[in-house]
Image: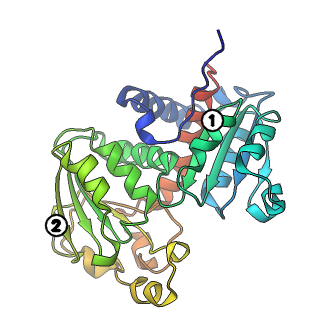
């Protein structure tokens, strides 16, 4: 009987126990890095990035190198054979013969699912259009667990581009599994959370939420404030982007009434939505969040390759 390949396309592919186990391994890696430095000797990660990325691609590469493995791949579609007209399915079919595991980012929603159907090795979705970004969500969950010690009883403010923000969509899906979670959805009308997420995730699971266009309205209630940038690459209209890109800017004055233990997060890159003056606030956790990405991806690679 042929062995079933395990992929990560959507955060919901993982059970809550699997997420807890990944976080436990990631924390162990943080505390005992040398113990993991040869776990993937002889293994190869392929990074197929059809869309620009800095943190996600480099953190995957750093994760595999820290595990003792090697990396190959490309960082933009123009440097791959898709520029010659090769299909995604053919690219993945070939590359899966060169590597033991593939991390893939693609501008089209659903592309990682197509890749998984043709791959001989595990596929990790490193972001598909405005749809999902499960490894960013694992990074977010590790950060929340390290800062808050629990996933229960949290009020989470999500601010900015909730329409196209795949990190937002994945985080809502993950956090909706836990107890007594409330979401404060902060966005202009044009960038509100899609109805299908409200209906299929929030309403379906009886998750408490409010929608507002005012960042300050619920600031004093938040345990977590998750800022996002307005993504120029998701807009068809330059005029709409320019009108909305600076709609929310977090600065020190806006934090005056916030909780002392507020956790400020951002998937990065930021543009103008968090003032640099906030960086020195002890509640700012977005750079720790980026560092955490390496360790949770190390844990995920180990899991999907079934390395003990």
- Residue furthest to the top: 1
> In the figure, residue 34 lies in which quadrant?
top right
Task: Name above or below for residue 255 compared with residue 11.
Answer: below
The quadrant where residue 78 appears:
bottom right
Q: Which mark is drawn over residue 53?
A: none
The C terminus is located in which quarter?
Answer: top right
Question: Do we see residue 79 in this rendering?
Answer: yes
Counting from the top left corner in percent of width and height, residue 60 is at 65, 46
Read off the residue under disc 1.
117
Q: Which labelled disc corresponds to residue 220?
A: 2
Q: If you read the primary sequence from the N terminus, does the residue marked by circle 2 or circle 1 appear first?
A: 1
Residue 155's spot in the image, x, y percent?
Answer: 20, 54
Asked whether, in this view, residue 145 is left or right of residue 13, the answer is left
Residue under the point 62% across and 56% down: 106
Q: What residue is drawn where x is 25% and y is 64%? A: 185
| Residue 182, percent from left and from top | 19, 52
Q: Is residue 188 visible?
A: no
Q: Quadrant of residue 226?
A: bottom left
User: Considering the numbered disc 1 on the image, is that residue within a helix, a strand or a loop?
Assistant: helix
Using the image as rendered, state which of residue 72 and residue 4 is in the foreground: 4
Q: Is residue 302 above or below residue 111?
A: above
Q: Relative to 220, is 251 on the left or the right?
A: right
Label 2 vs label 1: CA separation?
46 Å
Q: Residues within 10 Å of mark 2 (few under 14, many from 20)?
A: some
In the rendered structure, the answer to whether residue 293 lies left or right of residue 200 reads: right
Classify 61 as above or below 23. Answer: below
């Amino acid at each position: 009987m042929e062995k079933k390949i395990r992929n990560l396309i959507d955060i919901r592919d993982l059970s809550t126990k699997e997420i807890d186990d990944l976080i436990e391994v990631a924390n162990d890696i943080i505390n005992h890095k040398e113990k993991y430095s040869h776990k993937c000797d002889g293994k190869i990660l392929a990074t197929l990035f059809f869309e620009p990325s800095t943190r996600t691609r480099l953190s995957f590469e750093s994760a595999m190198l820290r595990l003792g493995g090697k990396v190959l791949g490309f960082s933009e579609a123009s440097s791959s054979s898709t520029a010659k007209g090769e299909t995604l399915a053919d690219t993945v079919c070939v590359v899966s013969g060169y590597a033991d595991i593939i991390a893939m980012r693609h501008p089209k929603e659903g592309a990682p699912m197509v890749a998984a159907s043709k791959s001989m090795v595990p596929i990790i979705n490193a972001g598909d259009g405005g749809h999902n970004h499960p490894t960013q969500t694992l990074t977010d969950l590790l950060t929340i667990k390290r800062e808050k010690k629990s996933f229960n009883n949290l009020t989470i403010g999500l601010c900015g581009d909730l329409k196209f923000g795949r990190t937002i969509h994945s985080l809502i899906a993950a956090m909706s599994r836990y107890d007594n979670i409330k979401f404060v959805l902060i966005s202009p009308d044009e960038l509100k959370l899609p109805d299908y997420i409200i209906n299929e995730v929030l309403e379906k699971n009886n998750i408490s939420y409010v929608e507002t266009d005012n960042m300050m309205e619920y600031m004093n209630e938040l345990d977590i404030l998750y800022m996002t940038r307005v993504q120029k690459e998701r807009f068809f209209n330059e005029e709409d982007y320019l009108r909305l890109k600076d709609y929310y800017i977090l600065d020190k004055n806006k934090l005056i009434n916030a909780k002392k233990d507020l956790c400020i997060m951002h998937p990065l890159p930021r543009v103008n939505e968090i003032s640099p003056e906030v960086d020195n606030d002890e509640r700012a956790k977005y750079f720790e969040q980026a560092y955490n990405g390496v360790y949770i991806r190390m844990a995920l690679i180990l899991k999907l390759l079934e390395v003990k």
